[in-house]
Image (tube, rainbow, N blue to C red):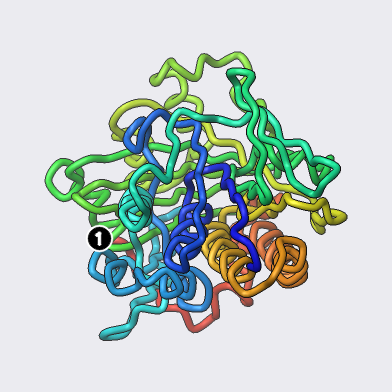
Amino acid sequence: MSTTPRIAIIGAGPGGLVCASVLQQHGVPVTVFEREGDPHSRSQGGTLDIHEETGQVALRAAGLFDRFLALSRPEGQQWRLYDRHATLIRHDQAGEGEVSKPEIDRGQLRALLLDSLAPGTVRWGHGVRAVTPLPDGTARLHHHDGSVEDFDLVIGADGAWSRVRPALSAAEPSYAGVTMVEIHFDDVDHRHPGIARLVGPGTMSAKAGRRSLVLQRNSNGHVRGYVTFRGPQDWHAGLDLADTEAVRARLLAQYEGWDESLLDILRDNEGGFLNRPMFVLPVPHTWQRVPGITLLGDAAHLMPPVGVGANLALLDGAELARAVIDHATVDEALDAYESVMLPRAVDHAKTAQQMLTSLMPDTDSDVAAFPDTQWPATARATRAQ
């Protein structure tokens, strides 16, 4: 940059934080606005597999790759696929020393990124109400307390329900036809040995038609589960979602006939059930250039959660920072960034939608749950013990 721009990043998720980290490493000041009150105000979610061609590229750009590897769990790359009878259809294991997509808890990744920033970079408890472009090519932040601040570049890294996106696009997320209900298990190896055997050190999925049960091992003996099914968004009509036993009964009825070891996932979870309907942005989602404003991650390309979103957010953030560093003006930087990010996002979003359709078809046929393109006929089948 010929002059130092005033840059605001809205949202302290992985994409926004890696963008801030790369900018600061090259002497470009930045402020991150985050609506959460502090780094520990809520759980950051489950585990992420960080891919070598996307997320790992971003962490290398931020100088954090070695620290990431030290925190990551390469053993978490294991994947087990079962049918509804608890027959093991496929078991993928990483080779010795392979780190193509090791797992890391979202909270650990966020802490790693936050530690790389200068003190005071993140303004906690500062959600943004809206962003408006100004005639001089800058952008104005409207805070919830009525105050405003002007910046040369505002980056919307604020996720699915972005407050920045309306400045660029009228698109809104829509229900994808699939719901995930989140569940939890603590100290799983001692308190839930059956669950521990099913999930192993990584991830498992049991599938039949429009329904699946997914378990993911996190660090410290914690397992998150996702009861995933295709159906209406109001599947819980007439049900109080805070009534744990009523929700449990409704879900058990949906999975009637599944193996008892799999039904224990629904019977034995600790705490309540968290309803998480799946939303997506239209494909393609693009916009006409608005000077001084852009998006990254889910704010730009919300897609089904098939292992792509967080990795693309990280790559978006690192590439946007690099574009700002390498170009003389903000407008040139956005030309360079958006010309790559937008078509890449369209390609990945199409692939993610195809994967969702394949993995969660609108049918109850067991055969449809395992298309040959996803699960080769040579896959090993054994009974889960």
- Report crowding for label 1: few under 14, some 14 to 19, many 20 or more residues within 10 A (C-alpha): few
**Can I make out residue 354 in this image?**
no
Looking at the rendered image, the quarter that the C terminus falls into is: bottom left
Q: Residue at x 35, y 30 (%)?
A: 41
Looking at the rendered image, the quarter that the N terminus falls into is: bottom right
Q: Residue at x 81, y 40 (%)?
A: 134
User: Which of the pair 126/216 is nearer the observer?
Assistant: 126
User: Residue at label 1?
Assistant: 385
Residue 237 image point, x, y percent:
63, 19
Residue 235 image point, x, y percent:
63, 28
Residue 129 image point, x, y percent:
65, 27
Q: Name the image quarter holding residue 335.
A: bottom right
Left or right side of 340 for 260: left
Query: Residue 3, relative to residue 166: is it above or below?
Result: below
Query: Residue 234, relative to residue 336: is it above or below?
Result: above
Left or right side of 131 for 52: left
User: Which of the pair 46/224 is nearer the observer?
Assistant: 46
User: Which of the pair 67/244 is nearer the observer?
Assistant: 67
